[in-house]
Amino acid sequence: MMVEKKDLSVFVYAALMLVVFTIALAIPVKGQTLKKTFKFATFYTAFSGGNSIADANIYSVTNGLQTDIVETPFDYSLTVGIRKIARFGYENRATTFYNGTERSYSDAATIGKVKGFEFLFETDWRRQQGRNFLDQNHFLRYVAKNWIVKAEYVQDGFADVKYFEGSQRFRLNINDRLSFNLGVAQRISEPYGYDALEEWILSNGNLHYTTLAIQEGYSVDVQASEYYNPDGDLVANSVDVWEQVIIPDVIDNYVDRKRSELPSQWNYSVVVGYDYYKYSKDFWVHNWVSVMPYHLKTEGEYSYFEATEGEQWVDYSGGLIFGWKLNKSLGVFLEGKYNKYWNREWHDFSVGLNYVIL
């Protein structure tokens, strides 16, 4: 029995983006403050696709030679978004249109290129090798000379992480390149660190999987070695099939269901970080780091403090964009970002060189 999580947030955000965009264009506001806020913002949507991995032939000789073909549907990506983020000097707008496939590491930076209000609302529905993923990245950010306020929602389907985060920080400018920030952050997420299988672990470390399956509605005829799903269908007629095929699916569905039933958890943390940006035509560095070294201890059965046995932990995120044109022909680059929140880690990077033959 598959457990399907119903997440309506994607529809809420998509509707919100359209409503806000429409209002911004339709309502005249005295002083044109709203129009100024959305000036130079870009609304974009795109659909792309292509073939997935090749179909696989599955052979069986149980009742003579039989061949089944496992087909994988085509890959696709549907992206909808609206953004107003000033480009840094190193960002080259190579294409005419936004198509949703652009990778801009600088979107994750604490501080933007300019002071003031910036925002991004982007949702991406993807299918890759027959699996569906949902990615969302939404944020509102206001950067002033001495303070920063940001609210964001992040969902990375590949990394299996999603959370809301708000932060309020004081900003100390050392010079026009380097600034430090200190403040507080509030996050709300599912109870990461919760082990849904803990109550099913035996004293010898093994999992009491058959009892778990029976609780989930499966039935077992030990004498006949027959195993039935909750609908009464025969799904296995041997221990090997039961343990290697059915039980992993039972455990996966059980864990998903238990996670979806639990209440969201709040985290209140101290956050400290810095931003460094230097740019010239031949050399540039953009580096930012945010660290949460201390968290307000909250009571509760599903608090992350339960997973750490009451000890503090460190969450952090950061990014680096580096480029150097050594001469007229040779240039090297390195860019990427890394995130570690709770027991989740996700990152991406790109590194390489360009050589122009003159």
Image (cartoon, grey):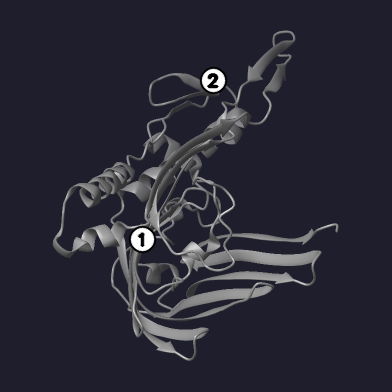
Q: Nearer the viewer, mark 2 or mark 1?
A: 1
Q: Earlier in the sequence, mark 2 or mark 1?
A: 1
- Relative height, residue 55 to residue 122 (above, below): above
Residue at x 38%, y 26% (from the top left corner): 230
Q: In which quarter of the view is residue 74 placed?
A: top right
The number of numbered badges drawn on the structure is 2
Residue 275 at x, y percent in the picture: 50, 79
- Relative height, residue 96 to residue 227 (above, below): below
Left or right: 242, with 229 as reference point: right
Residue under pointer 1: 119
Crowding at dot 1, Cα within 10 Å, few <14 / some 14-19 / many 20+, comes out as many
Residue 78 at x, y percent in the picture: 46, 37
Under circle 2, the secondary element is: loop
Q: For the view shown, which residue lies furthest in the bottom direction?
A: 174
Identify the mark at residue 284; answer none if there is no mark: none
- Amino acid type, label 2: Ala
Residue 217 at x, y percent in the picture: 37, 31
Left or right: 358, with 273 as reference point: right
Out of 303 and 271, give the one closest to the viewer: 271
The N terminus, quarter of image: top left
The C terminus, quarter of image: bottom right
Identify the mark at residue 224; answer none if there is no mark: 2
